Image (spheres, helix red, strand yellow):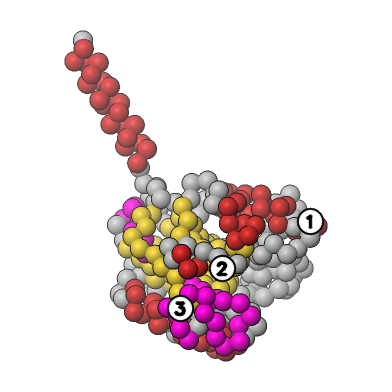
Amino acid sequence: MKKLLSLTATMFAALLFTACTTVEPGPLRVATFNIRVPVDKGVNAWEKRLPRIHKIVADNNFHVFGIQEMFRKSQHATLNSFPGFKRVDGNNPAYQNLAVYDVIFYRPERLELLDQGVFALSETPDVPKSKSWNTNLPRETTWAKFRDKSNGKVFFLYNTHLDHRSVAARRKGTDVNLAHIKANAGDLPVILLGDFNAPEFTDVYKKIAARLNDSRKITETPAAGPYNTCSGYNRKPGAGAHLDYIFVSPGTRVLSYRVIDTLVEGQFPSDHYPVMVEMELK
C-alpha cells in the first residue's frame, strides 16, 4: 500500500511539473506600443491611462512587446508590474538615469532570454546617452536575443524610437540600427519594431524595407484595424499618421496583423495604438 501511495504521489508530481512547464504552442505574438510620456492632463493623464495600458496588454496576450516613451520618473516602477512578464532594458547601468527609455517585455514561459544590450542612436553608438544630428534628447535602441521554447528557434528583437524632429537623425539612426543588426544578428531571424516617426513615403521607411519586410505588407490574412497607428487621441477617420511598424527578416511568415484601436471604457490608453502580429520565424 505504501509503495502504491508513493508511486501515485510520484506520478502526480510528474504530471503537475509537466503542466506547470508546458510551453504554449502556436504563432509568436509580437507587439509594439508607444505609451506616451506623462504630460497630458484630465482624462488622458498618466494615472488614468495606466490601467488602460495594462488591460490592452492583458487582453491581447502578447508573448513579447516593445514599449516606447517609458518615462522613468513616474513609470519605471509601475511598468515593472505587468503580470507574467519580465523586462529587458539592455542591462547597462549607464542608461539607468535616462529620462525617456525604450524597453522590451517578454513572457518567460514562452521565451528564454539569451542576451541583451542597448546602444545610442548617434555618431558614437557605444557612448551611452550620446546625441547627434540635432536630436532634442538622447535616442537609443534596446535589443534582446531570445530562444522560443516552443520550437527552439533563436532570434533577435530590436526596439527603437527614432527622433520626432530631425530628419537627419531619423535617417542616420536608421543606418545605426541596420549596421548593428548586420553585425550582431548575422543570419538569425530579426524583428525590428518601434515608433519610427516616418510614414511609408520617406527615405527611412524605404531604407528599412529594402532589408526587412514590413509585416503589414506580407500578412497572410487581411490587416485589421485602422491604417494610422498614431491617433493623437482622435477617432475621426484619417486622423493621425502611420508611424509604428514591425519589420521582420525575409522568410518570416506573418499570419496576422492588427492595429489595436480598442478603447477602454471609451478612453484611449495612449496617443498611439499598439500594433500586434502573429508570426512564425523562419
> Which is nearer the N-term, disc 2 or disc 3?
2
Please report the bounds of the magenta region as a residue range: 123-151
Asked if 120 appears above or below 233 in the picture, the reply is below
- Does residue 69 sit above or below 48 in this rendering? below
User: Which residue is nearer to you in this view: 90 or 7?
Assistant: 90
Q: Nearer the viewer, mark 2 or mark 1?
A: 2
Residue beneath disc 2: 98
Q: Estimate the x, y position of residue 139 in percent, counting from the top left.
A: 55, 76
In reply to whether residue 265 is colored magenta, the answer given is: no
Visible residue check, residue 216: no
Q: Residue at x 46, y 64 (%)?
A: 93
- Answer few, some or many: residues within 10 Å of disc 1's Cα (few below 14, many 20 plus, some between 14 and 19): few
Mark 2 is on which residue type? Leu
Is 140 within the magenta?
yes
Provide the secondary structure element on which disc 3 rests.
Answer: loop
* Left or right of 40 on screen, residue 111: left
Q: Residues within 10 Å of mark 2 (few under 14, many from 20)?
A: some
Q: Position of residue 61 (x, y in %)?
A: 52, 51
The secondary structure that most of the magenta stretch takes on is loop
The residue beneath circle 1 is: 43
Q: Assign a secondary structure to mark 2.
A: loop
In this view, the residue in front, 149 or 119, is 119
Quadrant into which the N terminus falls: top left
Residue lying furthest left in this view? 3
Q: Which residue is mark 3?
A: 127
- When asked about the image quadrant of residue 197, the answer is bottom right
Of the numbered discs 3 and 1, the one sitting upstream in the chain is 1
Q: Residue at x 55, y 86 (%)?
A: 132
State the SS at label 1: helix
Q: Is residue 230 visible?
A: yes
- Give the amino acid at mark 3: Val
